[in-house]
Image (cartoon, grey):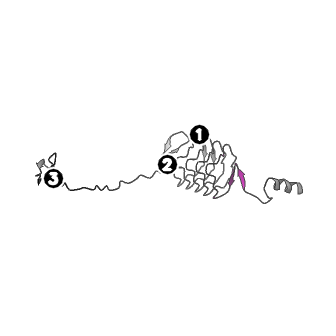
Amino acid sequence: MALLLVALAVLGMTACSKTKTVNGCKVKAGTNCAGKNLVKADLTGANFTGANLTGANLTGANLTGADLSGANLTGANLTGAKLVNTRLEGANLTDANLRGATMQNTDLAGAIRCRTTRTDGTIDDSSCSRPTAAPTTRATTAPSPTERPTTPTAVTTTTPRATTTTPRATTTTTP
């Protein structure tokens, strides 16, 4: 027993420690592992709820039974990852790459999928918000009294039966 405790102390762990660290990423809810290299990591059953995994490289990682609910996976690379019985409810998968990933019984309810590469390589834009056209306002200035219009303007009136164009009178003043 004493030898086990010494070995755990050398590794920086305690007998009660449940937090796993992989390449500098603490595997726990709410953790910040943005940009971390987790290639082929065994993250079976990991609790990453609400975690920041922005830009993380999870290529070939095993996330079987992991909980990534509400996690930010923007720009994450999950190419070839194993996502079996994985929870991704409300996760942000914007610009994430899932090409070749194994997804079975994976819960994507409410996940944000914008420019997300699906397992088959197609792009999922189902959650991209569409900007609404804002009204445009142009500042106009009245011509000075010395300016002369170069082209006459016209007013077009449309009625149910005919369209007529009537030249508009132009007034210019010269000093």
Q: Mark 3 points at which residue?
A: 146
Kindly report which numbered mark, 1 or 2, lies closer to the viewer in this rendering.
2
What whole-number distance in Å separates the C-alpha atoms at marks 1 and 2? 18 Å
Magenta residues span 16-45
Q: Residue at x 60, y 41 (%)?
A: 79
What whole-number distance in Å separates the C-alpha atoms at marks 3 and 1? 70 Å
- Dominant secondary structure (helix, strand or loop) of the stretch shown in magenta: loop
Residue 137: where, in percent of width, then height? 30, 56
Q: Mark 1 points at which residue?
A: 100
**Residue 113 included in the magenta stretch of the image:** no
Local packing at callout 3 (Cα closer than 10 Å; few below 14, some 14-19, many 20+) is few
Q: Which of marks 2 and 3 is nearer the N terminus?
A: 2
What whole-number distance in Å separates the C-alpha atoms at marks 2 and 3? 55 Å
Residue type marked 3: Thr
Q: Mark 2 points at which residue?
A: 114
Q: Is mark 2 on a helix, strand or loop?
A: loop
Local packing at callout 2 (Cα closer than 10 Å; few below 14, some 14-19, many 20+) is some
Specify the quadrant of the image occupied by residue 57: top right
Residue 122: where, in percent of width, then height? 50, 40
Q: What element carries label 1?
A: loop
Residue 22 badge: none
Q: Position of 172 compared to 110: left or right?
A: left
Q: Which residue is drawn at 59% across and 49% down?
A: 106
Q: Which of marks 1 and 2 is nearer the N terminus?
A: 1
